Amino acid sequence: MSGHSKFANIKHKKEKNDAAKGKIFTIIGRELAVAVKEGGPDPNNNSKLRDVIAKAKANNMPNDTIDRGIKKAAGDIGSVNYENNTYEGYGPSGVAIIVETLTDNRNRTAANVRSAFTKGGGSIGTTGCVSFMFDRKGQIIIDKEECEMDADDLMMIALDAGAEDFSEEEDSFEVITDPDDFGTVRESLEKEGIPMAEAEITMLPQTWATLTDEEDIKKMNRILDLLDEDDDVQNVYHNWDE
């Protein structure tokens, strides 16, 4: 994945989102609620909840906030009615975009997502129109500055735990897993005390698209900014080579 450092994007996102940490915590809070509803409030017996907790910690969510979210979700189990919806479409010059949402009002979310695409000169497509251009994978990013372990040792731990691939970037290590093996690999790294800058199931593009026209770049950023501002939007994946 040389030339496509996910970590650079994470750092950019984290800097950008320091002022909007509430948005990240809202997203994770909803994921905690859904995980608790599906598998109960005990992370020892709920692998999905363990994964969401790991994501929360990677985003610097305080432990007491995580605990409160779990307890609140456990108490409100009957009233948690969030619904997952995925939208696929195109940005300027055919850039592929996938938007994952978690909402209690599907009509509101659909209208907001469609509006974001329209305002940025894009368009919503049919289900499956761009997802075939992505691979669903578990992805773990490790900041080199935070990890004292030798690259070869780190690679062996990851591969022994079931990782599919390990790569070294300039400022980070990247571990790729099958989605079904993600939790096992993440927990193996956690037991070794390896700090993770990001750990999640994601959609990785098979090919990348470049934008050279300044107007197209402006429009693409407009779509991404509008989606980023929407609390119902959980994840946005695209194949734009920024």
Image (cartoon, helix red, strand yellow):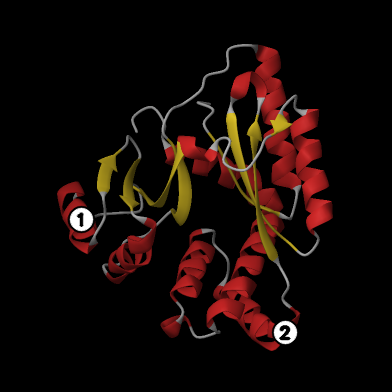
Q: CA distance from mark 2 to mark 1?
A: 40 Å
Q: Quadrant of residue 35?
A: bottom right
Q: Residue furthest bottom?
A: 75
Secondary structure beneath dot 1 equals helix
Q: Which callout, 2 or 1, points to the residue nearer the camera? A: 2
43 relative to 122, above or below: below
At which x and y percent is residue 37?
Answer: 61, 79
- Left or right, 6 with respect to 233, comes to left
Few, some or many C-alpha atoms within 10 Å of disc 2 (few <14, some 14-19, many ≥20)? few
Q: Which residue is mark 1?
A: 159
Task: Tell me what residue is drawn at x 76 percent, y 80 percent.
Answer: 79
* Amino acid type of the residue that numbered disc 1 sits on in the rendered structure: Leu
At which x and y percent is residue 188?
Answer: 28, 67
At which x and y percent is residue 106?
Answer: 78, 57
107 relative to 44, above or below: above
Q: Which mark is residue 83?
A: none
108 relative to 12, above or below: below
Q: Which residue is mark 2?
A: 78
Q: Quadrant of residue 56?
A: bottom right
- Left or right, 153 with respect to 140, comes to left
Task: Tell me what residue is drawn at x 60 percent, y 36 percent.
Answer: 97
